[in-house]
Image (spheres, coloured by chain):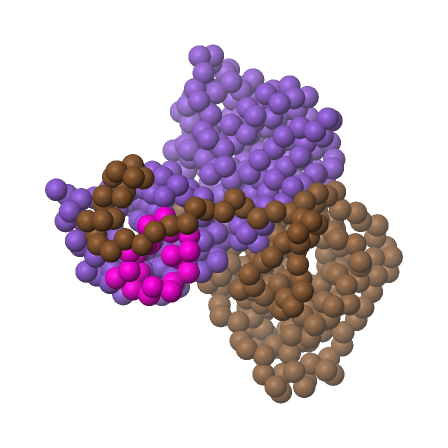
Chain colours: A brown, B purple
C-alpha cells in the first residue's frame, strides 16, 4: 500500500504575524517555519496505518522552493519513507497546487491521499477537495476518525461538521483531509532525524511533470484587521452588569 | 454584469440564517455592477425551505429535490452545483462559509476548472473587475485580492454581511431535474451524532457564552456555561481544550477551526485567548472575559475583563441576572 501525504511549509502557528509596512507581504524576518499542523496530523495517521499494516510506503510531497526541504526532512524524520519536492519559485494558488498534486498522484499512484484540511497561513480549506474533483475520486473532509475497512478498499470516517460528528464511508482511492482531533502527531526523535538523512528525497520541476500551471489569484495588499478599542477591567459582577446594561447596552 | 448562484444551506430543511448573508453578498455585487442572482436549494422534500427564500429578490429559487440528496453528501452535491452553475452560466457561485460549503464548493469549482476564494469579507468593483477581501492567518491578516477567470467560486463569512432584508416581490420556485443515475457514488452517508438542544446555534445567537479549560467537566459546563447562556437567552460555545478533553462536542468549538461567530455579546469564561480561539470571535461587538489569570491574552481583546474564579463569579452573575 502507498499513502501520499502532501504537506505545506507554514510559519509556526504561534507566530505573532507582522505585516510589512507597505502591505506587500508578511514580515518573515526571524520567523520559524513548521510543517502545517493539519498535515503533521495527516502524516501521523499514515504512519499509524503503516505501523498497523506493515507493508505501507508513506510518501511526503510538497510544492515550493528549496527551503521546503526542511519540512520534508521533518516528515522523513517522523517516519515517512520517501519525500518529493516539486520545485517552483512561483506562488501558486489552490487550484494550481491541486493540479500539481494531480501530476504527483499520477506518478505515485497511491491507494489514497491523506492531507491537512487547511493550511494555517491562508486558512482556505480547498486543495484536498479540488484534488479529488480533478482526479474524479471520492473525498472525506475534516476527518477526526479513520478506519480502513473491507480489505482496505474503503475508509469509514468520522467528520467534524458544524452540526456534530458525521460518519461517511468512502471508496478508495480517495482524498482524506484531516482535522485537529484525528490524532496527536509524534515528536521527531534524534534517531528519526539520523535515519531521515539516508531516505530518498527527490526534487523535480514543473516541466519534469509536464505541467504548466499559473495562479489565478493575485494578492494586491495585506493589512491587519481594524484594532479593537482598549478594554477595561471591572472589579465585581455588579460593576460588569452595570457596564453591560448602561454603557455597552447589550443587556 | 454578474450572474450569481447562491447555494442555500439548511439542516434537514431548517434554513441556516447564514444563507441570508450569502444573499446579501449577491445583493451587494448586483447593486455595484448590475446582474442578477438565483438561489439553489438541494435536498429531499425541501419545498418549504425554498418558499422561505422567495422574498429576497432572486430571479428564481431553484430546487434540486431528490431522495438521493437527503443528506449533504460531498460528491453528489458538488456535481449538482457544478451542473446547475455550468448550465446557467453562473459567473459567481457563492455560499456562506461553513463545513457544508467548504466540503462541496471547492469540489464543484474544480469540476468547472474555476478558481475559488474562501472566507471573503468584502467585495467591490474596480472598473471591469471585482476586488475581494479575505481573511488569513487566523484572522490576523486581511488580504485584498483579485481572482482571474470568468467563473469564480466563493465562500463568504456570514459575520461580514448583514442578512439580506425581505422584499415585496416573490421569486418563482423552479425545479431542477435530477438524474440520480448520473450522480457519483463514492461516498456513503452513515449518520450523524448530534445532541438535541433547545439553545440557539452560536452562529445565529445574539449572545454566546463560551467555556474554556477552567471548566472541569460536562456537568459543570452545563451548570455554569449553560446556566449563564440560558439566563441570557444565548448560545453556548467552547474552546478547543474542552472538546479535546471530551467535555463538549466539536459542534460547540469556536475558533480558526470551528465556528466563527460575531454576536452582540461574547462572554469568554476561563478561556485563555489563544490566537486560534480569537480567530473565531474577534468580530463580536462586546467581549467579556472572566479568567483567574490576569495575564491571560483574552484580556487584550476584551471590552470588559473580570479577574476571578469562574466557579464563584458565574453563579453570582446568573443569580443577579435573574433578579
Q: Quadrant of residue B312?
A: bottom left
Residue B210 screen position, x and y as percent: 33, 52
Q: Is residue B12 above or below residue A102?
A: above
Q: Residue furthest toward the left?
A: B323
Locate the C terminus of chain B and report the quarter of the image it occupies: top left
Asked where in the image residue A190 lies, by quadrant, the reply is bottom right
Q: Which residue is pictured at 68% across the width and 26% down the height?
A: B89
Residue visible at 16% across and 53% down in the picture? B316
Image quarter of residue B185: top right
Left or right: residue B81 compared with residue A200: left
Task: Say whether residue B296 is magenta.
Answer: yes
Looking at the image, can residue B319 be seen?
yes
Image position of A157 with respect to B191: above or below:
below
- The stretch of residues the image draws in magenta is B289-308
**Nearest to the observer: residue A207 or residue B2:** B2
The relative height of residue B150 versus residue B279 in the rendered view (above or below) is above
Amino acid at each position: 500500500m502507498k499513502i501520499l501525504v502532501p504537506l505545506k511549509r507554514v510559519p509556526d502557528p504561534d507566530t505573532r504575524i507582522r505585516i510589512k509596512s507597505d502591505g506587500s507581504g508578511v514580515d518573515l524576518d526571524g520567523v520559524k517555519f513548521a510543517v502545517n499542523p493539519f498535515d503533521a496530523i495527516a502524516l501521523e495517521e499514515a504512519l499509524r496505518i503503516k505501523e498497523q499494516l506493515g507493508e505501507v510506503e508513506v510518501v511526503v510531497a510538497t510544492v515550493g522552493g528549496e527551503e521546503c526541504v526542511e519540512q520534508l526532512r521533518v516528515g522523513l524524520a517522523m517516519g515517512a519513507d520517501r519525500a518529493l519536492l516539486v520545485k517552483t519559485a512561483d506562488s501558486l494558488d489552490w487550484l494550481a497546487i491541486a493540479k500539481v498534486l494531480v501530476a504527483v498522484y499520477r506518478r505515485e499512484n497511491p491507494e489514497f491521499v491523506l492531507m491537512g484540511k487547511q493550511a494555517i497561513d491562508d486558512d482556505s480549506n480547498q486543495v484536498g477537495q479540488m484534488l479529488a474533483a480533478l482526479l474524479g475520486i471520492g473525498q472525506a473532509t475534516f476527518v477526526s476518525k479513520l478506519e480502513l475497512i473491507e480489505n482496505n478498499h474503503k475508509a469509514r470516517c468520522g467528520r467534524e461538521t458544524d452540526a456534530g460528528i458525521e460518519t461517511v464511508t468512502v471508496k478508495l482511492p480517495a482524498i482524506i483531509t484531516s482535522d485537529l482531533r484525528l490524532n496527536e502527531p509524534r515528536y521527531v526523535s534524534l534517531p528519526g532525524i539520523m535515519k531521515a538523512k539516508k531516505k530518498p528525497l527527490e526534487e523535480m520541476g514543473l516541466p519534469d511533470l509536464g505541467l504548466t500551471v499559473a495562479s489565478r489569484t493575485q494578492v494586491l495588499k495585506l493589512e491587519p484587521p481594524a484594532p479593537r478599542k482598549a478594554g477595561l477591567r471591572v472589579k465585581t459582577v455588579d460593576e460588569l452588569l452595570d457596564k453591560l446594561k448602561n454603557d455597552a447596552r447589550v443587556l | 454584469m454578474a450572474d450569481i448562484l447562491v447555494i442555500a444551506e439548511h439542516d434537514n430543511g431548517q434554513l441556516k440564517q447564514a444563507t441570508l448573508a450569502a444573499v446579501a453578498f449577491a445583493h451587494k455585487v448586483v447593486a455595484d455592477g448590475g446582474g442578477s442572482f438565483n438561489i439553489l436549494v438541494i435536498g429531499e422534500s425541501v419545498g418549504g425551505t425554498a418558499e422561505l427564500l422567495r422574498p429576497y429578490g432572486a430571479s428564481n429559487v431553484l430546487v434540486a429535490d431528490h431522495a438521493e440528496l437527503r443528506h449533504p453528501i460531498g460528491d453528489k452535491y458538488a456535481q449538482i452545483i457544478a451542473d446547475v452553475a455550468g448550465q446557467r452560466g453562473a459567473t459567481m457561485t457563492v455560499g456562506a462559509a461553513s463545513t457544508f460549503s467548504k466540503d462541496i464548493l471547492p469540489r464543484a469549482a474544480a469540476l468547472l476548472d474555476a478558481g475559488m476564494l474562501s472566507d471573503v469579507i468584502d467585495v467591490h468593483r474596480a472598473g471591469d473587475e471585482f476586488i475581494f477581501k479575505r481573511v488569513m492567518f487566523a484572522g490576523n491578516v486581511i488580504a485584498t485580492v483579485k481572482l482571474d477567470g470568468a467563473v469564480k467560486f466563493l465562500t463568504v463569512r456570514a459575520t461580514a454581511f448583514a442578512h439580506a432584508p425581505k422584499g415585496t416581490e416573490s421569486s418563482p420556485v423552479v425545479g431542477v431535474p435530477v438524474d440520480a443515475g448520473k450522480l457519483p457514488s463514492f461516498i456513503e452517508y452513515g449518520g450523524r451524532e448530534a445532541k438535541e438542544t433547545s439553545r440557539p446555534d452560536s452562529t445565529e445567537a445574539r449572545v454566546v457564552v463560551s467555556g474554556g479549560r477552567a471548566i472541569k467537566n460536562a456537568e459543570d459546563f452545563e451548570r455554569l456555561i449553560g446556566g449563564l447562556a440560558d439566563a441570557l437567552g444565548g448560545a453556548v460555545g467552547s474552546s478547543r481544550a474542552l472538546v479535546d478533553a471530551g467535555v463538549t462536542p466539536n459542534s460547540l468549538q469556536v475558533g480558526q477551526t470551528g465556528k466563527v461567530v460575531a454576536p452582540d455579546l461574547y462572554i469568554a469564561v476561563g478561556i485563555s485567548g489563544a490566537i486560534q480561539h480569537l480567530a473565531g470571535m474577534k468580530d463580536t461587538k462586546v467581549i467579556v472575559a472572566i479568567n483567574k489569570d490576569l495575564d491571560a491574552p483574552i484580556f487584550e481583546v476584551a471590552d470588559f475583563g473580570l479577574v476571578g474564579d469562574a466557579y464563584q463569579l458565574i453563579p453570582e452573575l446568573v443569580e443577579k441576572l435573574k433578579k
